[in-house]
Image (tube, coloured by chain):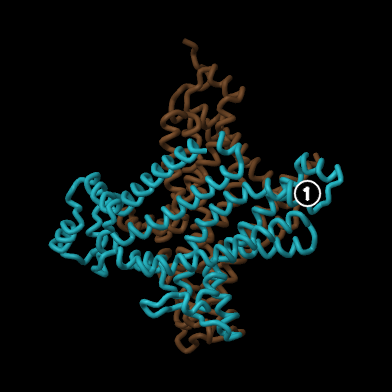
Chain colours: A brown, B cyan
Amino acid sequence: MMARTHHPSNFFNTVLTASIEQVSPALRALSNGLKLALMTNAGRVGLSLIVVHLTLAFVGSWLAPYSATDFHLEHQLEAPSSQFWLGTDQFGRDILSRLMNGAGSIIAISLAGTLLGLALGTSVGLISAYVGGTLDDLIMRVMDGLMSFPTLLLALLVLTMAPPPEEWLPSWLAWNGLNVVLTIAIVFMPWVARVIRSATLPLKVAEFVQNARLRGEGTLYMIFVEILPNVFPVLVVEVSVRLSYAILLASSIGFLGLGIQPPSPDWGLMISEGRMFLVNAPWVALAPAVAISSLVVGVNLFSDGMRQAQKLPRTK
Amino acid sequence: MTRFFVRRLILIVLTLFVVSIAIFAVTTVLPGDVAQVILGKGATPQDVETLRNELGLNRPAYSQYMGWIGGIVQGDLGDSLYLRRPIAELLQSRLTNSLVLAVFAFFVAIPSAVLVGIWAGTHRDSRTDRVMSTMSMVAISLPEFVTGMLLIVILSSTLHLLPSSSMMLPGTSPLTRPQILIMPALTLTGVIFGYVMRMTRANVIEVLQCNYVRTAILKGLPMQRVILHHVVPNAILPTITIVAASIGWLLGGLIVVEVVFAYPGLGRLLLGAVETRDVPLLQITTLIIAATFTFSNLAADLLCAVLDRRVRLS
């Protein structure tokens, strides 16, 4: 038997090598995507909107003029003024401060959900395509089953039945957006798995993979070191498309009252509560509506820009 | 064709089987003790035990599943836990209401989206194309509840043209007051219109770049004829698949829209089941919506197969 000199078939070693060797192609794919998007107007506008929202997410809670949860009972449902720039809600809470504080959670939830969903979907898709045969059939039937649910429906089902985080996690970890993150990941998994599977199938028979097999590399090495880096470009497009769905999904979940629980500011929930005052105090619901929409428009413009640029003739 | 049909049908049965298992697993197996989840933390052990017996939770999981799915196949949907009434009875009017709304939105959105998409694709980068593309981009970026709210602010509270709520007296049909359907249907239209229009446009642009289209133009056919006979038939096939996928959005959007406009449909029933932890009702409503989506995908597959021989043979 041929000795495997350069990569012992130890699980941890394989994973470690894989993660080191993958950081660079992942970063390259990412920076490539960024560069491409910046070549178009849509990409530039999109990125600026995203940057504004990201800034809010990181420093919003420090910059906010008031607390997100303090009541100013003498200022209920006040119209925008120099004191409260975007007006106040039914408890006299400052809407601008609530928006600034809520930016972090919706972005964190959608981003974490998307990334986790991509990780799950990529693993499932890679394994399914690489192993093939009955396992592939079985996995793909289950994914088909999951894809037969409209996304919001599957999300509602999982969210309703999943136990709240504080019941199964230590208290310092039990953030109440965690279930939404897991839900988004589960909902996205089958879609990502299908895309990755079809990207993997041609790679499986590619020459460099055959070479690795002849060298006697293990299955894990083949999947994570040889094949994974080559599906990164597909993944970058997937991130940008999935992210806007994730924001829409997370805000819908919030709107239906199944996301972050009050009094924490959640944009979707703010709209849901503000609907009652739509006639006399429309700013209560409109401000968070503009916030969500501009975020999704930004992400969509950005991913559009990226795809447009990929179709342009390369000038290199 | 028959073989293709039979194979698709077997696949659908298999998918529905997976769907029903998924629903059952998520609602009964995943939470550990459903009775405890339904009753909450404050429940006495005795109450929990009674509910466990009522739901048959003491039986093994596969026997519970067989009992549940067996009942559905024979037309017995079980009783709602919270409302204490047969689920079949609760569904009747809700199903028709949602169906009316969904069909209404579908037939407004899809033909117009496909037409606008074809037009935009063949007039690429013209000013109208840019305007339409920007509008569809905004349409897909707004969540349904934002679109719905904007419509209420504009059409109802500012212009006083339409009622802001689509509430109905029990036992009445939405068709007796069709004006209450307009805003919910427009909201649903917004989302799928943007999505389908963008995809149709992209498909048309792709087909326009094909060699056979260039040949048709170069041999001197009038542009209108090229578009009608060469471009549209080839661009419409991928569009059908997109339309089927957009039904998933439509069904998801239905849940939100029914909440925004207080419209008594299946989505509100489902959310009611979520709020009251009415597991039997939740299972059935979810199953109905998922099955509808599955069958609309089947319909799209069959339509594609009828229109394109290659699909049948692959």
Q: Tell me the residue at 35%/49% (across/down).
A: B20
Q: Nearer the viewer, residue A271 or B106?
A: B106
Let me know if residue A55 appears in the view: no
Q: Numbered disc 1: what chain? A: B
Can the viewer see residue A153 in this picture? yes
Of residue A91 and residue A234, the one placed in the foreground of this image is A234
- Residue name at image x 73 percent, y 48 percent: B229
Quadrant in which residue A59 is drawn: bottom right
Residue B288 x %, y %: 39, 57
Residue B305 rendering spot, x and y as whole percentages: 56, 42
Tell which residue pokes out farthest to the front in this image: B2
* Residue at 51% over, 51% down: A114
Above or below, comparing residue A138 to residue A260 in the picture: above
Q: Which residue is mark 1?
A: B226
Location of residue A199 in the rendering, given as x and y in whole percent from the top left corner: 58, 36
> How packed is label 1: few (under 14 Cα within 10 Å), some, or many (20 or more)?
some
Which residue is found at the position 58% from the left and 84% from the top?
B161
Using the image as rendered, state which of residue B50 and residue A79 is in the foreground: B50
Question: For the view shown, which residue lies furthest in the top direction?
Answer: A1
Image quarter in which the C terminus of chain B is found: top right
Q: Looking at this view, is B281 or A21 the one in front? A: B281
Q: Amino acid at mark 1?
A: Val
* Left or right: B155, with A133 as reference point: right
